[in-house]
Image (spheres, helix red, strand yellow):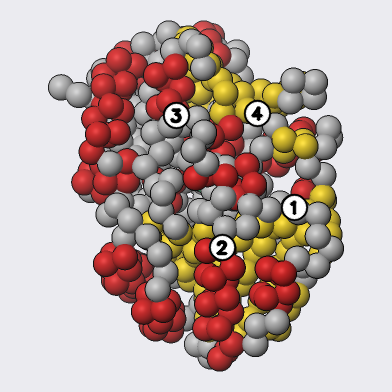
Amino acid sequence: MEKVLSDKNLEDLRRSLAGTVLVPSDPEYDTARRGFNALVDRRPAVIVQCVRTDDIAVAFDFARAHQLEVAVRGGGHNPAGHCVCDDGLVIDLSRMRKVEVDPESRIARSGGGATWLDFDSATQAFGLVTPGGVVVSTGVAGLSLGGGIGHLTAQYGLTCDNIIGAELVTPQGDVIHTSTDQNADLLWGLRGGGGNFGVVTRLEFRLHPLKQVVGGRLVYKGSGVREALLRYRDVVTRSPRDLSCQVALAIDESLTPILEIVQCYTGTKSDPEELRTLRSAPGLIEDSVKIHTFLDQQRVIDSTYGANRHYWKGHFVREIPDELLDELLKRIVELGRPPGGMMIESLHGASKDANVPPSAVGFRQAAFNVSVMAVWQNPALDAEQIAWARESTAAIEPWSFNGGGYVNYMQADEPIERVRAAFGTDTFSRLQRLKQKYDPHNLLRRNQNIPPLQ
Ligand SMILES: Cc1cc2nc3c(=O)[nH]c(=O)nc-3n(C[C@H](O)[C@H](O)[C@H](O)COP(=O)(O)OP(=O)(O)OC[C@H]3O[C@@H](n4cnc5c(N)ncnc54)[C@H](O)[C@@H]3O)c2cc1C
């Protein structure tokens, strides 16, 4: 039911903020409420576009006073559509996108609503990087808080492994700082535990020197796809630390399988053996791998914002034996129509180092993240596409690492058991204690939710 806020209530809110208030009658409202996933179409009562830390506490107060549900919006990419709620209040951080870089100490301070384009542009100006997401319009905070897998995972670990500090506003309006020697329990929880504990207004990251990579896309079609997939699996299983690699399996209109290997090599060899192995697989129809800047690498993958309906589901797996690989090849044809597909991300290299910082991440020891991604436009296909994603995920389950999926890719309909499994029972209980401390009334529940310990 639509919540009615009086003009006086809204005027009071506007006066208390440095940012902007949008309601359904405003011309900017429709753009501001849209997220990446067109399957999610929600109409909040009010959107608060914050520009400073104090605005967030004001927004929380207003939500509490008017009993409004709260959603937090960074880059708007979460496939569950958690950045928007019906009849509630959206804390929109898209105007808090400043990224400051200290090249001497190799630290970046990123505003709560910054995207990877904002971040990479600022850090690359100094020839520095942190391992982030592969689509530059994705939010830095949203991605990092859930873990973060991308083009530099093998080299520098998960994105959250590189978080060294944060500023956050709790639902009570307290501004909390965390670092390795201040509220370290919170830093542990922010590394993987999602947006459960407060609204992050600033994240601090460790940076690494990197200007150029050997990157791009290798595309295979038809009968060569199986062999290329086998080679991909075997190459990354040898754990080359200077090669991050992920693949997307799809079909064309004639239901012929297509495989894209997106790779990012940062070593010193001019013709690395791993790349030779992949390049010589049969069925190669496109090879755009070349030396280019890291910013160009970040442009290799793109995804249209707000146009397609998405339903994603998956499993971290212990391994990809031939049997699972054949199952994926069978299921991709059963999709029956493009687009959509399956993505495999390898978790080899730095994210498994013994000295990674303490974190709530539960999937670190898995070998791969296998995600089934239904993508379509026609609402009449909703049931068919969702069923394909669910059934294909069930087929992967026998190889599941922990029974849970990747919190960053989960839809909103995942049961709490899957969220608990994603972290493991002990880590989930510890996260619940942290939630009890920072958000005891679970005001931040539109997320992969960790309910407070009762
Ligand atoms: C096209 C696409 C590409 C992607 N690529 C990758 C990838 O390469 N690697 C990867 O690991 N993941 C990837 N993801 C998944 C992505 O990391 C998650 O969906 C993430 O939640 C998106 O963050 P966002 O800020 O863009 O989303 P939003 O929908 O705006 O936010 C999602 C949730 O994150 C939390 N949140 C966001 N900002 C804050 C903040 N400042 N403070 C507190 N909580 C916050 C809130 O709970 C919010 O509801 C991708 C998703 C898409 C759609």
Report crowding for label 3: few under 14, some 14 to 19, many 20 or more residues within 10 A (C-alpha). Answer: some
Q: Earlier in the sequence, mark 4 or mark 1?
A: 4
**Cβ of disc 4 within 8 Å of ligand 1?**
no
- As drawn, 148 above or below 68: below
Q: Nearer the viewer, mark 2 or mark 1?
A: 2
Q: Earlier in the sequence, mark 3 or mark 1?
A: 1
| Residue on which disc 4 sits | 206
Disc ID at residue 266? 1
Helix or strand or loop: what does disc 3 sit on?
loop
Q: Earlier in the sequence, mark 2 or mark 3?
A: 2
| Residue on which disc 3 sits | 358
Residue at point 24%, 30% (across, down): 429
Residue at point 36%, 37% (across, down): 447
Report crowding for label 2: few under 14, some 14 to 19, many 20 or more residues within 10 A (C-alpha). Answer: few
Q: How many marks?
A: 4
Q: Nearer the viewer, mark 4 or mark 2?
A: 2
| Residue on which disc 2 sits | 238
